[in-house]
Image (spheres, rainbow, N blue to C red):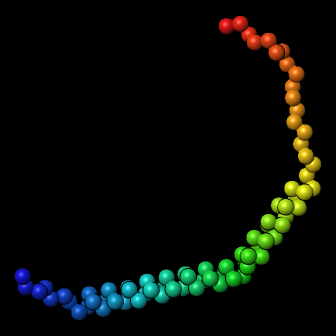
Amino acid sequence: MAKRKEKPWQFKVSFALTIIMLFCVFGYFTQSFLEIRKVKPVRVAIERLSATSKEADVSPEATPVIEEGNKELPDQ
């Protein structure tokens, strides 16, 4: 089979699109990394865990309520 000759402009356009896509992906990960560093996820996780443990200590224990009802079973 003979090798098909590609047009040089197709290679240039494909290469340009590849470079643009690479920059977009790199920019996305850079922006995500910077936003995560602003939030400080470890500190947020520690604060949430300590807040839930404090709420659990403060809340009173719920006493089970047993309803007195008719203990007879209905006839079937």
Name the residue rendered at 85%, 19% in the picture: 69
Where residue 3 appears, x then y in whole percent?
11, 86
Q: Residue furthest left?
A: 1
Q: Nearer the viewer, residue 23 or 70?
A: 70
Quarter of the image with the C terminus is top right
Q: Is residue 39 above or below residue 12?
A: above
Q: Is residue 5 above or below residue 50?
A: below
Say whether residue 44 is left or right of residue 31. Answer: right
Say whether residue 55 is left or right of residue 17. Answer: right
Where residue 12 appears, x then y in whole percent?
30, 91
Name the residue rendered at 75%, 70% in the picture: 45
Where residue 29 appears, x then y in whole percent?
56, 82
Q: Nearer the viewer, residue 32 or 12?
A: 32
Name the residue rendered at 79%, 66% in the picture: 48
Where residue 67 appears, x then y in whole percent?
87, 25
Say whether residue 31 is left or right of residue 12. Answer: right
Q: How many marks?
A: 0
Q: Nearer the viewer, residue 38 or 60?
A: 60
Residue 39 falls in image quadrant: bottom right
Q: Is residue 42 above or below residue 60?
A: below
Residue 66 falls in image quadrant: top right
Residue 31 falls in image quadrant: bottom right
Q: Residue furthest top?
A: 75
Q: Nearer the viewer, residue 59 or 2?
A: 59
Name the residue rendered at 87%, 36% in the picture: 64
Quarter of the image with the N terminus is bottom left
